[in-house]
Amino acid sequence: MKVGVLGAGHLGKIHIRLLKEIEQFELVGFYDPNPESAKLVSQEFGIESFDTIQDLLDKVEVVDIVTPTLSHYDCSIQALKAGKHIFIEKPVTNSLEEAYEISKLRKEMGTRVQIGHVERFNPAFIAAQGAFNNPMFIETHRLAQFNPRGTDVSVVLDLMIHDLDIVLNMVKSEVKSVSANGVAVASENPDICNARLEFENGCVANLTASRISMKNMRKTRLFQKDAYISIDFLAKECEVVRMKDIDPDNENPYSMVIDVDTNGNKKEIQFEKLEVIENNAIKEELISFYHAIKQDETPIVSLSDGTKALELAYQIAESIK
């Protein structure tokens, strides 16, 4: 399947390298508005740099949009009008109106669109899938050292949106209320934010995102009936702590046991480190998009998913204001 890339910045070059490795795709070339940068990338990867977006669209079936967020809408509309399947790096667009327009045009054209919420393909999150059972409290921390790249949008759209997508994927309920605060420290947009989400089913999610931290952290903790789950997206590790009823006929004398009430009832604590199968998450999401197109199925991270995460991000932004 012939694919082209729009945008050859830091992340764009990663996509170019991986698309060259994926046998299901034939990387035709890329477009970047900076001619000097485009020349260097063309030489580095040995692929064609196109002079215009339209020139590239004429040669491909699939478009991978890895441009700054502010240009996602224009690139997407042009590609969809040309009848192309498109992969859009997160966040889907800079505004909800733009996301709705893309959704409307996608339905008219009948093409496939996937959003680059790459944490869905993180091996630690994949390993944890079987452990989720109606989580009722979720806490996320996504902290990063300052990097000017990405400061054209708030930390909510830059970092927290990853966790918004993850939380919406785990909690099968509508959001009831949103409260948040945030501060612009090093840029013109909020660089640190904390948000509290309350869902119709009673679940509460507390999310913190910062791009002015001294260290990097990407952790999510979930609490549900008789279990606690810890997912480290950065270290790619997942641990589950479960509370199990004790079998009086088969009690393990070495197990950790706690009293759960004043009536003498006890439960056994079990620790399990889940097996995490290493992968390249960006590569996996691109391959999954190929299969969605080939099998004419809704992508794992659909345009609807990306739009819902964006809607929630803007609710948080309004709460900050």
Image: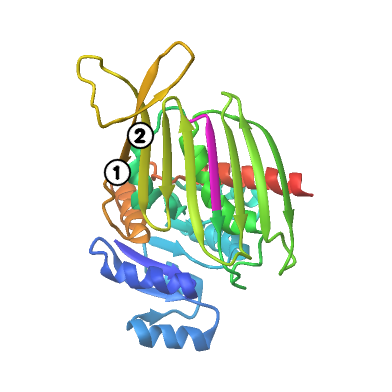
Q: Earlier in the sequence, mark 2 or mark 1?
A: 2
**Label 2 neighbour load within 10 Å: few <14, some 14-19, many 20+:** some
Query: Quick one: 179 or 318, which is closer to the camera?
Result: 179
* Label pair 2/1, CB-CB below 8 angstroms: yes
- Whether residue 91 is visible here, answered yes or no, is no
Which residue in the rendered view is the most extreme toward the right?
A: 321
* Residue 155 highlighted magenta (yes or no): no
Q: Residue at x 47, y 59 (%)?
A: 82
Which mark is nearer the camera, 2 or 1?
1
Q: Is residue 43 above or below residue 212?
A: below
Image quadrant holding the N terminus, namely bottom left
Type of the residue with mark 1: Leu
Residue at 46% x, 70% y is 11
* Residue 224: image location, x then y, percent: 46, 29
Q: Which residue is mark 1?
A: 274
**Residue type at numbered disc 2:** Ala
Mark 2 sits on what residue? 131
Name which quarter of the figure residue 144 lies in.
bottom right
Q: Secondary structure at mark 1?
A: loop
Main SS of residues in magenta: strand
Coordinates of residue 235 in the picture (x, y in percent): 39, 58
Q: Is residue 140 magenta?
A: yes
Which percent across, then down, holds residue 42? 39, 84
How many numbered marks are there?
Answer: 2
Q: Which mark is residue 73?
A: none
Q: Secondary structure at mark 2?
A: helix
In the rendered view, tell whether residue 290 sits above or below residue 245. Answer: below
Give the magenta-colored segment's residue range. 135-141
- Which color scheme did the rendering employ for the protein? rainbow
